[in-house]
Amino acid sequence: MTAPPAGLDELPQVLVGRYRIERLLGAGGMGRVYCARDLLHEQFGDPDPYIALKLLSEPYAEAPDASALLFSEFALTRHVHHPNVLRLHSFEVDTECRRAFMSMELMRGLGLDQLLCERPLGLPWRELRDIALPLLDALDHVHRRRVLHGDVKPSNVMLTEDGVRLFDFGLAQAEAGVLPGLAHLSRTRFNAWTPGYAAPELLDGGPLSVRADLYAVACVIYELADGQHPWRRLPANQVRDLRPPLELSVPRQLPKRCWPALRCALAFDPAARDITLGQLREVLADAGTSWRKRGR
């Protein structure tokens, strides 16, 4: 018998009699994503039967609410449904290994984290704008659907053959009244905020908010424009200790007219982050449009 591919030891080779796992695509703090072949689609002649499967990593898979946690991510991602958000197929449970998983499109492309490694000086403005605008569109739509993403960072955005995709809603939260039948799970025990992109108030124990997502996406845009994180001079785990006043230079590839808007979105004080995603998008869409903080 041949050995299973690396990272597959704890799983059967075929889930629910349909999905043959081929290889591990990636692993994060809470989940693992695999490439798999849909044997049913393959049987009926689908020329591209490959999909992706996401399962919770150990030890989260052993938690009593593991399946509910993964279903929450599935339901929230499906609820927002946008061209620039990862497309899901189904949520299923394999009774043999007693593991829940969700099937989704197999994204073929380059993650923004990989792109940044290849472009240490940042992206030319037009290329940057073609990434930033659909990313802002996606996040703004997510908020209009009254969902908060909670983990916007370069490794959760991919440039695919079909355009930009925002994914990984594992830390997402719905506002009160949205999907009322969904189990409301406490994610505080996971301590999973990404320090370099989590807003300071999150690292101080505050609640997730629209302005926290705004801060995270502003960090990503700054990094795309400069090649480095806005707080690159300090280790990511020290960001929580930063306090204003803080000086930031204009990113290399960002038009100067766009800087006041992006700088506002990067404010450490959430009350000072008084620009919307729509306003930030408008400024980036037309670099000739200036923006002034209210009261100035």
Image (cartoon, rainbow, N blue to C red):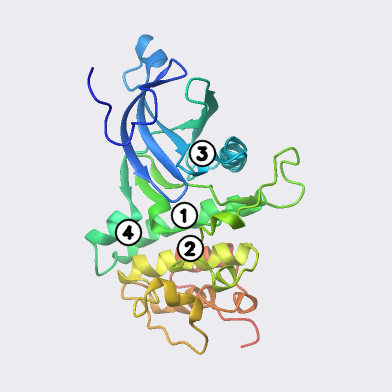
Q: Which residue appears at 58% of the width and 67% of the height? A: 202
Image: 277 above or below 269? above
What is the distance, in whole Å, between disc 3 and disc 2 at their CAs? 29 Å
Comparing 52 with 99, the one in front is: 99
Quick check: can you spot residue 155?
Answer: yes
Type of residue at label 1?
Leu
Label annotation for residue 135:
1
- First in sequence, mark 4 or 2: give its number: 4
Image: 240 above or below 24? below
Q: Which residue appears at 40% of the width and 79% of the height? A: 256
- Percent across and percent down for residue 234 are 37, 79
Frontmost of labels 1 and 2 is 2
Comparing 242 with 129, the one in front is: 242
In which quadrant is the C terminus drawn? bottom right
Residue pointed to by mark 3: 61
What is the distance, in whole Å, between disc 1 and disc 2 at their CAs? 8 Å
Type of residue at label 4?
Glu
Q: Secondary structure at mark 4?
A: helix
Give the crowd class for mark 3: few <14, some 14-19, many >=20 residues within 10 Å. Answer: some
Frontmost of labels 3 and 1 is 3
Label annotation for residue 222:
none
What is the distance, in whole Å, between disc 3 and disc 1 at their CAs? 30 Å
Type of residue at label 2?
Val
Label annotation for residue 127:
4
Q: Are marks 1 and 4 in contact (CB under 8 Å)?
A: no
Q: Are marks 1 and 2 in contact (CB under 8 Å)?
A: yes
Q: Which residue appears at 39% of the width and 61% of the height? A: 129
Q: Are marks 4 and 3 in contact (CB under 8 Å)?
A: no
